[in-house]
Every structure is written in structure tokens, then in C-alpha cells.
Image (cartoon, rainbow, N blue to C red):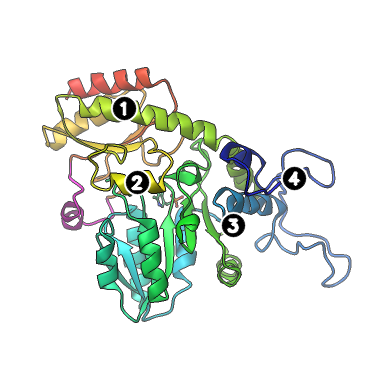
Amino acid sequence: MNNNSHRLGTKFIHAGTVPDPSTGAIMTPIYQTSTYVQQAPGVNLGYEYARSQNPTRKALEDALAVIENGKHGLAFGSGVAATDAVIKLLNPGDEVIAANDMYGGTYRLFTKIFEKYGIKFIYVDTTDIENIRKAVTAKTKLIWIETPTNPLMNITDIKGAAQISKQAGAWLCVDNTFASPYLQNPLDLGADIVMHSATKYLGGHSDVIQGALIINDDALRAQLYFIQKSCGAVPGPMDCFLVLRGIKTLHVRMKQHCENGVAVAHFLRNHPKVERVYWCGFEDHPNYNIAKEQMRGFGGMMSFVLKDASMEAANKVLTSTKLFALAESLGGVESLINHPATMTHASIPREERIKNGLADGLIRLSVGIEDAEDLIEDLRVAIEAS
Ligand SMILES: *Cc1c(COP(=O)(O)O)cnc(C)c1O
């Protein structure tokens, strides 16, 4: 039932899944198989070998396409494996314009793995799209943005970036992990590729590592599928089943993430010991108008710094919360607290980090879907102990 005209909740529940043809099972079975028996050499049912095709993965990939309003979905063994596949579209000498504030693992993949193959990455502040325009050269093949960004919640104008990429003859890829397809659909705004760490909101239960790409263009899909099967970073069927199941409740979870996000962001902002809260739902956020235009809500991700900017004070908060668990990752039903400088973003050199506004004392929250009052009380006690 892949009807793109359905409303969000209906789409998330029905996307990609049809009753299993052999039994009528309402949930797509976990096809735990490596190969498929052929009737005669080269005569098969469309499935030859599980690196290339798997029915559970196929159901998930169809679902991914539906929920991002795209034509094709591709699932990968992790978010970074999905990113890796996109960069493998390029050739030595090609240039990528990338955001200077993004997931640390993306930055590490670009600088530590792909630079040595002769691909050049130019990092700019993409919150002002004129910086993207100025960085375009005849060699620009890809523009890579993340919005909202991890962890500073900066917003980039997707439509504006898409206009620049079209003029430049380059692809625009948007890492949509933080927003999830419930809040934002970059393909509708002109992006060529949407990337997800499905580990986060799509899976939603902190029990799987997975990545996704969604595209409209048939030729681009063919190139990415070729990379997926040739390089082999495919997810197993059990993991595909988990993400497929996660997607069915994305809209109910996201509604609660958004509601709790509003409550926690305002609590933090009004706390006398808090210096600044980074959350794109505040009307005085520098790109609030763009966020409001391209997103349906503001989610549960936010960061903050204390007035006492010392590492000791931040550490006190990070180790004092009882409900917010100190852990990397985000987007699960349970709340997490994280210290980007030593955890998720430790792979970015300190100098680079500070230059981009990511302070040593910055604390990031993934606000879960528990009761907001309990989350606020947990933070209040921890902040007062700092
Ligand atoms: C986690 C994350 C990634 C990487 O995904 P993995 O599933 O951990 O490989 C990429 N981008 C963002 C924004 C993320 O939060």
C-alpha cells in the first residue's frame, strides 16, 4: 500500500509492507537466508544471493522510499556505510562542499578515509547558503548538508542549497537523521539524496545499527545499488525487520519527542544556571524562520552550556542524571545525555571544534518519550548539583 497521498501516520504504518505471499503473515518475515534455489541456471524468482537481494530488506527499502516521498530506498549496514556509498559516486579530483558542523563520524570518514583517494572536501558554514555558492567550482560534484546539525542544532535552507546544487550540476545530499521523515522531507525541497542513520529515530528503540539512502532519480538509484552490492555494506534481515517495525510507530514517537522537547528546552532556558540552549524551536534561533518553513516540528534534540563553563560543572551534570543515561546515540524512546567533546565528536580536532562553536562544556540531550515532568525533575536535580 505505497500511496504517497496518505497522511503521515497511515503512511508510516503501511509503508512497504504487503501480506507475505506464501502465508499471508501481516509482518514481513525475517528471511534469514544467504541464497535462493534456482529452477534452472539463471531462472529464479528475482532473488539470487542475499548481498544483492533479500525480501525483508526489499520491504524495508520500499518503506523508506514511501516515508521520504521518494521513488527508491536503499538500506545499509550503518549510517556511515550509507554515507560511504554516496562518496563512492565520486572520482579523484572531485570536490564536495560540506557543512562545518556535522556528525563527527561523517567528518572522520571524509577526512581520514576519502581525502587520501583524492576527493577534496571544502567545509563551510552552510547556515548562510551564500557560503555554499561562493565555494562552488567546476569540480563541485556533491553538496553535503545536515539540518538540524549535530550537536549545535544549526539549520540550513534545503531549498536554497538545492537551487545552488542544480546550477552547479552537483548532487545535494541531506543527512535527515535529526529531523526524521516525520518532521522534514528533503526530496520535496529539491535534494537529490536523503541519508539517514536508521539507528536513531527510524529504529527508535536503541537496538539496531543501520543506514538508509532515499532517491528519486532512476540512474542515481542504479549507481547507488551497484555500490551497495559491490561494496557489500548491507544490513541483515533481522535488522531490517527491526527498522521496519520501528517505522510503524515513528509518528506517535515523534509527536511525544516534540512535545517533551518543547517542555525541556523551555525549562533549561529559564534555569538560572544555564547560559545558553541550542534548540531550533526558539523564535530567536538565528534560522527559526527557515526551520519553521521546512520542518513540521522541532524534535527532541538539543544542547546546552552552563554559566559555569568548566568541565567539572558539565561533568557533574553528565554523571548526576538518573533517567537521562550517559551514552552516545539518540532518537530512542529513552532519554540520553552526551558530552560531544569527549564522546560523539571526539574525532574532530579540538581547535576545529572550538572554531565551529562546539565548546568543551557543551551537553547534548536526546529527549525521549518518558513523561516530561520526570525528565525535567531529573535535569533540575543534576543541574543544581553542578
Ligand atoms: C549517528 C549518526 C550518523 C552515523 O550513523 P551510524 O548509524 O552510527 O553509522 C550520521 N549522521 C548523524 C546525524 C548521526 O546522528
Position of residue 63 measured from the top left corner of the image (x, y, whole percent): 62, 49
Number of the label disc, if any, that sits on residue 207: none
Reading the image, the residue beneath label 1 is 264
Main secondary structure type of the part rendered in magenta: loop
Compared to residue 196, the image places residue 226 above or below, namely below
- Confirm or deny contact between disc 1 and disc 2 (CB under 8 A): no
The magenta span reads 346-360
Q: Can residue 281 be found in the magenta stretch?
A: no
Considering depth in this image, is 380 or 41 the residue closer to the camera?
A: 380
Q: Nearer the viewer, mark 1 or mark 2?
A: 2
Badge 4 amino acid:
Val
Residue extending farthest to the right is 39
Work out whether mark 3 precedes mark 2 in sequence or the reverse, and give the earlier one. 3
Work out whether mark 1 precedes mark 2 in sequence or the reverse, and give the earlier one. 1
Compared to residue 323, the image places residue 224 above or below, namely below
Q: Nearer the viewer, mark 4 or mark 2?
A: 2
Q: Nearer the viewer, mark 3 or mark 2?
A: 2
Badge 2 amino acid:
Ala
In this image, 383 relative to 189: left or right? left
Number of the label disc, if any, that sits on residue 73: 3
Q: Can residue 352 be found in the magenta stretch?
A: yes
Q: Provide the secondary structure element on which disc 1 rests.
A: helix
At x 72%, y 63%, the residue is 49
Q: Quadrant of residue 356?
A: bottom left
Compared to residue 282, the image places residue 17 above or below, namely below
In this image, 27 relative to 353: left or right? right
Q: Provide the secondary structure element on which disc 4 rests.
A: loop
Reading the image, the residue beneath label 4 is 18
Considering depth in this image, is 50 or 365 the residue closer to the camera?
A: 365
Position of residue 193 measured from the top left corner of the image (x, y, whole percent): 49, 62
Reading the image, the residue beneath label 2 is 291
